[in-house]
Structure formats: structure tokens, C-alpha cells
Amino acid sequence: MREGITAGLVVIGNEILSGKITDANTPFLARELRVLGVSLQRVTVIPDDIDVVATVVADFAARFEIVFTSGGVGPTHDDVTMDGVARAFGRPMVEDPGLRRAIEQFVGSRINEAHLKMARVPEGCELVTDGHPAFPTVVVENVYVLPGIPEIFQAKLAGLRDRFRSRPYHLRQVLVREHETGIAEFLNATLAAFPELLLGSYPKLSDPQYRVRLTLESKDKTYVEAALADLIRRLPEGFVVKVED
């Protein structure tokens, strides 16, 4: 089982930047990677521009162990992600014979240039079938090129999960009825005692039961339990509403 994997996500699409489409893939990927023990470090949204895609993908590929792209892999004029990823690694675009045959079998006599565009991939890429042999996932070095359609994005990620599995995060949550200003000193004290703890503080304005949700995370279960006990001990009596997993 791998440990300490870092990841980045590049969301590609003018429709996201213009607000015409709401990005659903980022929150889904973030949740899935957390379960797998992968740390999503950065997300960026960029336009359908080959040069921009190439620059950002190359930067992310150098920074993170795994990079995902979302969007821009269809048959239309604004689907430029494959070309951008190819340019990021200095590779030409080539037609894959296996992909062409699969598309021809799927489409039949209706095949046209738009269909065949989807058979063009960066030279030397890996084609991962992940249960969908007709439409494999294209992988170039450490970059996984995924479609923007949420249903397909999610299905493809499900087929790739075991490639990224790492030691999972352990999570405990504390609901408190005091505002952040009233608990900040206790949070700081626990962090000083447990500097490796991932501690989050999230105010809730509309719930009558509590005002802040605290999250404590670590890949070491013993460590997070010890930090939780330390925090509970520091918080004044009556502050804690509930402790959850």
C-alpha cells in the first residue's frame, strides 16, 4: 500500500469559467481521493486553450505524483485537452489503431472525422481499459486524462481507484456550541502539542445545535485519537455538543 501520494486536478473548460456549467467533478474527486488516502494539493480551472493546457499540465506533472484533467476530450472544436497534454510532454498526436477500430465498431457506417478525432492520442500514452475497453482512459506519464461529463468521470475514476490507494486518513469530528473566537486558543494549544495533526474549523450559522464543526485528521489512528483527547480536555465544560467519526 502506497503512502503520502500527492495529486492535482486541472479542470478544463470555458463553460466552467463562464458559469454556464457547474463543476461537479472537483468535489467528487476530492472526496474519493481522501477515502483512498491521497492528498489533493491543488485544483485549477483553465480555458480551452492548447497552450494554457500544456503549460499548466506540465507544471502540475512536475509538482504532484498524480495529475487528473477533467474536460475537453470530446469530438468538437473546443476539445483540445489531448493536444495540450501531448504538447506538455513534447509528444506528437497520433491515431491509435485500436481506438479507431473500437470507434468504427461502435459507430458503424455513421463514422465521420469528429468520431475519428477521438482516436487521436499523445504518442506513447498508456490506454487503461478500466472496464470500458471501447473508451479507455488515456494516461501520459503521471497524467490521467478524464472526460468532463460527471457520470463518465465518476465511472472511470471507479475503475482506476486501486492505482492510487494509499494508507487512509482517520477522521474524528467535534461539534461545539461556541464561536471560533472562543475556541481558537484551545485549537492552537492542541496544534502545538500535535503539530502533525490536520485540524479544520468550520463555522455553521444556520444550525441551532452547534456553531463550529472541528475536524481532526491523521493517517495515524493513535495520533488522531490522542489529539482528540487533548482537545476535549482543553475545551471548557459545556462547549462540546457531540463527537463524531
Image (spheres, rainbow, N blue to C red):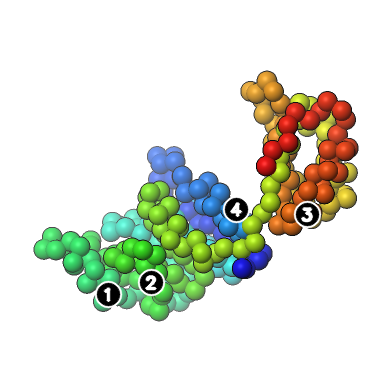
Q: Residue at x 34, y 55 (%)?
A: 78
Q: Nearer the viewer, mark 4 or mark 2?
A: 4
Mark linked to residue 98:
1
The residue wearing badge 2 is 127
In the rendered structure, which disc, 4 or 1, sits on the residue that comes first in sequence?
4
Inspect the image, locate mark 2, and give the three-letter code of the amino acid beneath it: Leu
In the rendered structure, which disc, 4 or 3, sits on the residue that comes first in sequence?
4
Q: SS of the residue at dot 1? A: helix
Q: Residue at x 71, y 26 (%)?
A: 210
Question: Where is residue 24 drawn, in percent x and y?
Answer: 46, 44
Inspect the image, locate mark 4, and give the three-letter code of the amino acid beneath it: Arg
Question: Where is residue 132 drawn, in percent x and y?
Answer: 33, 63
Q: Residue at x 78, y 48 (%)?
A: 225
In the rendered structure, which disc, 2 or 1, sits on the residue that comes first in sequence?
1
- Regarding residue 60, the answer to whether it shows in the image is no
Question: Where is residue 141 drawn, in percent x and y?
Answer: 49, 74
Q: Camera-side residue: 154 or 143?
A: 154
Q: Nearer the viewer, mark 4 or mark 3?
A: 3
Answer few, some or many: residues within 10 Å of disc 3's Cα (few below 14, many 20 plus, some between 14 and 19). Answer: few
Q: Camera-side residue: 62 or 50?
A: 62
Inspect the image, locate mark 3, and give the three-letter code of the amino acid beneath it: Thr
The answer to whether mark 4 and mark 3 are in CB contact below 8 A is no
Q: Nearer the viewer, mark 1 or mark 3?
A: 3
The residue wearing badge 4 is 34
Q: SS of the residue at dot 3? A: helix
Q: Quadrant of residue 16?
A: top left
Q: Is residue 13 above or below residue 19?
A: below
Mark linked to residue 240:
none
Inspect the image, locate mark 1, and give the three-letter code of the amino acid beneath it: Gly
How many dots with numbers?
4
